[in-house]
Amino acid sequence: MHEYDVIVVGAGGAGLRTAIAAQEAGADVAIVTKLHPVRSHTGAAEGGVNAALHPDDSVEDHAYETMKGSDYLADAPAVETFAENIPREVVQLERWGMAFSREEDGRISQRPFGGMAFPRTAYAGAETGHHLLHTMYEQVVKRGITVYDEWYVTRLVVTDEDDPADRRCHGVVAIDIGTGEVAGFHARNGVVLATGGAGQVFEHTTNAISNSADGMAMAYRAGVPLEDMEFIQFHPTTLPSTGVLITEGVRGEGGILYNAEGERFMFERGYANNAGELASRDVVSRAELTEVNEGRGIEDEYVHLDMRHLGEERIIDRLENIVHLAEDFEGVDPLEEPMPVKPGCHYTMGGIETDENGRTRIDGLYAAGECACVSMHGANRLGGNSLAELLVFGERAGRDAAGGEIEEPEVPTGRTDDAEEADFEPPVALGTAGVEPAPVADGGAMAASPADLVENAAESERARIDRLLERDDGVNHARIRATVQDTMGQHVNVFREESGLEQALRDVLEARSLYQEVHVEDPSRTFNTDLIQALETRNVIDVAETIVVGALAREEFRGAHWREKHQTRKDDEWLKHTFVSWNDGDPKLWYRPVVLEGEMQNYEPKERSY
């Protein structure tokens, strides 16, 4: 068994920033990650990182535009904490040596992004995430932080009190992908989940195949609510054949969207008369699919994104990797012809409920980055705010987990006095207990030491994995995952209807039933990706269900959440967050009001237009 003060699960941007902060606060830190850090999905972030750096910009404007972009479903204390702290984080990256693009006078270059009235997005060409990962990994190496790469965490070690608020997380159990060894990791102070988003719930996604909702699902089954899961961001410019991302930086630099009739439809069809292509992502995604659905799409599937007028010199200087992506994955040279694009699943705006310090309802368990929901994106995330978020809240989670000095949070967690039980009856039974061992330590182990609890959990996981490997036949995990991805893509996409959402729940139930017979064909212990993907698929099922439940319950139109029969934002009824609690296999839905009062200002909901 391994033992550290703080264990960080995941080594993308959030995990690396968390580990550095925890080490700076004096903790003995380890990172446990199923990928090598510089292969993490953060490297796919192309556009940039938002921060009010310019003297003519302001933290207050950044906070206001983030609240507006969220369609007033973000919590003001989280948004203001974010906007106040991100300029310092960007400067820190610069001092660590990050290769930002620069103006002739040496200042960090910033460009326009959707939903913002000021060019606030700092960038490093169109490979900002890649540079960010490498810069922080250098700091991890420099500081001697231990990294267990290609170790897949399968379980949190959490005590089993009835009320999750009384539970304590003591560590994790992980499998060494290279050898098949299963080992416990005891965390004396805390575990921080930084496992990224849930893009693998959908088939057409910009997310890496590693983004299988692992942290969300483990925290959920351990008793932490998942918040606002219905809000999935669909990015308007992904390549049709693969889902590979074409950065918003293309539109930020002046790229134009055209339909099959050659119309610049964002203006000519009145979708965003002021901002055009730089409206927020939810607006542009709906506009593109409306064009396709009304017969003005190209090959009935996509629209064109044209950047030829920018000129080769500017394109190569600022967007060179886009040229290569379009050539490699679509066979299109964007210096000579427009690129085909369509919306694709891009970002999970909900996630593990946390406060501004990354704390969850379980003592000793934290979350940061895309897997977490500190509630700063609400119903729609602005481009450039995700790298910024993982820096600010990764740093705070790491510092808090290590016992460093930090301000008390203002965003509440758990069932506060103003929480509300949902009047919601799903069309099919949700969740189930008994498919696998419970995720928490059994009551008989309560008197044992934390280290004993970790070892007991590791032994339980060894037995579970042995059973999977020894099963002679059953259902292939790829078939089960495809069942989920197909129904999510068909029924829980940009446009949503009640009957489709109900069908999606039935399909998820079928996948859950099939999973009881999941079969791993490769019996070996060495680099058994068949086993890893079988374990991931259980996480995909559980998280998909929470997305559909939230989407079915929220009967309004807000941000990325469009409902056919509910075409208005209903502030009187729905200025509230949705939560789904696992309840030991009996999921329940409940609500808590949005916090719109901040220290900078109160954010009165207004009609959102661009």
Image (spheres, rainbow, N blue to C red):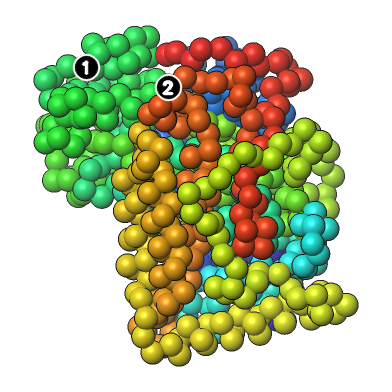
Residue name at image x 66 percent, y 37 percent = 591
> Is residue 241 shown left or right of residue 521?
left
User: Residue 479, image x and y in percent?
Assistant: 32, 67
Res. 127 in view: no
Quadrant, the N terminus: bottom right
Amino acid residing under circle 2: Gln
Residue at figure coordinates x 49%, y 27% from the top left: 556
Residue type highlighted by circle 1: Arg
Residue 445, relative to residue 20: is it above or below? Answer: below
Mark 1 residue element: loop
Drawn side of residue 499 relative to residue 240, left or right = right
Q: Could you say which quadrant of the image residue 217 lies in? A: bottom right
Dot label at residue 567? 2
Helix, strand or loop under label 2: loop
Instruction: Decide if residue 330 is on the left or right side of residue 377.
Output: left
Q: Alpha-carbon distance for marks 2 and 1?
A: 25 Å
- Comparing 512 with 530, the one in front is 512
Residue 513 in sight in this render? yes
Which mark is nearer the camera, 2 or 1? Answer: 2
